Amino acid sequence: MHALGSKFSQLLADTIIQAAPHVQEHVQQARADANHDFLEGMEQHVASLVGPLLTTVSQTGKVPPELTALLTELGVPTEQFTGIISQFFVFGVMFTLAQSMLAPFVQQVQNDVWSSHADRPLSPPDIATAVVRGIGLGDSAGVTIPSWAIAEAAKSGLGTEAFTTMVGTSGMAPALQLLFQMVRRGIITEGAKGEGGTTLISGIQQGDVKDEWIDAVSKLRYVEPSPVDLVAAA
């Protein structure tokens, strides 16, 4: 009985070993058929979505001749690989549409988040401009900032000090000749660096003149009288 069982086990093992390659072949074929059926179904489904859109584009748009064949193939794919490409096309179009449709809602969320955490720093160019023009952090250079402007800037992440500094660096002081005339007529005083206010030095500093040139430039306010002026004064 034991010997019979051993022979039967050996026979069963030999049968399984001999049948394994054939079973594997059938499994691979079944897997390939399933993939083929899936791709064929996807190809037909994508073609029903993409075909009308591409037909409209081809008929109403100015499509270069070299793209006509490509659009035709994408609209009615003849190969499974083209069906996959068409699916990527559909996904790209849908993603673009969804992104455009959701943009206002996403923007509102961004506005709310930034308004609650308005801590975005000034950019290096803004900082450099403020330094050259003698504007300190939170200095509006005499400009009164309404509350609505502060609230709107907060939606972009700018706090009160940062936005106030940007306001201070915006706009320009009067031209140098006008500043010189105002000094000569006693409208403004000469002032000093970093003093602020409506003075000659402050006006020069609020422009793009570097600090090392301010003293020399300020001396140009003195104008030598012309011969006409001397005759008139005689």
Image (spheres, rainbow, N blue to C red):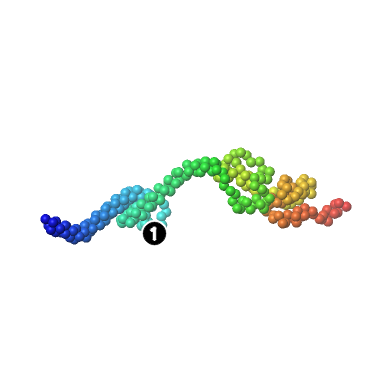
Q: Is residue 175 visible?
A: no
| Residue 190 pos. (x, y %) | 77, 49
For the point 62% across and 44% down, the residue is 161
| Residue 143 pos. (x, y %) | 66, 43
CA neighbours of label 1 inside 10 A, class few (<14), some (14 to 19), many (20+): few
Total tally of numbered discs in the picture: 1
Q: Going by the image, does 127 lie left or right of 83?
A: right
For the point 83% across and 53% down, the residue is 229
Residue occupied by mark 1: 66
Q: Going by the image, does 166 lie left or right of 191?
A: left
Kind of element beneath mark 1? helix
Amino acid type at image mark 1? Glu
For the point 38% across and 50% down, the residue is 90
Q: Is residue 96 visible?
A: yes
Extreme top residue here? Answer: 147
Extreme right residue here? Answer: 234
| Residue 126 pos. (x, y %) | 61, 51
Q: Going by the image, does 156 lie left or right of 20?
A: right
Q: Going by the image, does 109 lie left or right of 188?
A: left
Q: Is residue 119 above or below residue 14?
A: above
**Relative depth, front residue between 112 and 57:** 112
**Relative depth, front residue between 3 and 203:** 3
